[in-house]
């Protein structure tokens, strides 16, 4: 763990989702929307270290993000069930990468705990947009009436 409490090494870790005090939503430099999780290492020598994972909601990645969250956490984020992520556990695979000239730890894979870890996965919703809808003819997202932003 580095001086700021963030994970600074590669490996496999058991993590739990912590509440976000700013917003679950994020936007990349190129304008892509994502659902950002703060994860805390829950066991082992790095216990207490923080890392983050972003499930991207671009047209190309959205279905995979919805399916991954359902399999890993047992949460249907397409129906706005995001607060239920808090306290859920998962197994992550962390790799080191260079970003903006600095080496940092990045969650490469988000996986369920062995045997499901008590997270019961629902059938992912057929609703598109993780509580958001696509604007006509663009890759931008706008908030729908079915989901409140944090």
Image (cartoon, helix red, strand yellow):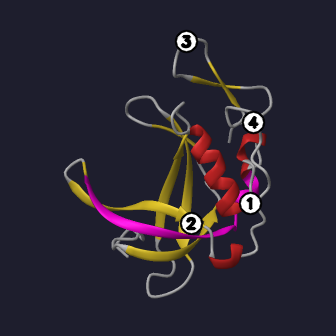
Give the residue number, with chain letter if any, for mark 1. 74
Disc 3: CA contacts within 10 A as few (<14), some (14-19) or many (>=20) = few
Q: Residues within 10 Å of mark 1 (few under 14, many from 20)?
A: many
Q: Could you tell me which secondary element the residue under label 2 belongs to?
A: strand
Is label 3 or label 4 in front? Answer: 3
Q: What element carries label 4?
A: loop
Query: What separation in Å lies between label 2 and label 1 (alpha carbons)?
Result: 12 Å
State the separation of the CA atoms marked 3 and 4: 24 Å
**Rendered image: mark on residue 137:** 3
Q: Where is residue 97 in the image (x, y as percent from the top left)?
A: 28, 59
Classify mark 3: helix, strand or loop. loop
The picture places residue 42, in percent across and down from the top left corner, at: 57, 79
Instruction: Identify the residue shown where x is 53% and y is 62%.
Output: 110
Q: Residue 148 carries which label?
A: 4
Circle number at residue 111: 2
Instruction: Kindly check if marks 2 and 1 are in contact, taking CB atoms under 8 A apart as contact.
Output: no
Q: How far apart are marks 4 and 1 (CA)?
A: 20 Å
Which secondary structure, mark 1? loop
């Amino acid at each position: 763990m580095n001086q700021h409490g963030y994970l600074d090494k590669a490996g496999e870790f058991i993590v739990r989702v912590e509440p976000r005090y700013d917003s679950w939503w994020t936007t990349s430099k190129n304008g892509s929307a994502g659902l950002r999780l703060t994860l805390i290492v829950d066991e082992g020598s790095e216990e207490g270290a923080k890392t983050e994972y972003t499930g991207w909601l671009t047209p190309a990645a959205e279905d995979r993000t919805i399916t991954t969250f359902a399999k890993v956490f047992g949460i249907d984020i397409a129906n706005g069930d995001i607060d239920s992520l808090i306290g859920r556990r998962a197994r992550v695979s962390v790799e080191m990468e260079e970003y903006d000239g600095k080496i940092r730890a990045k969650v490469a894979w988000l996986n369920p705990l062995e045997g499901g870890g008590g997270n019961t996965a629902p059938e992912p919703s057929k609703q598109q947009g993780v509580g958001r809808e696509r604007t006509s003819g663009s890759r931008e997202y706008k908030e729908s009436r079915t989901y409140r932003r944090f």
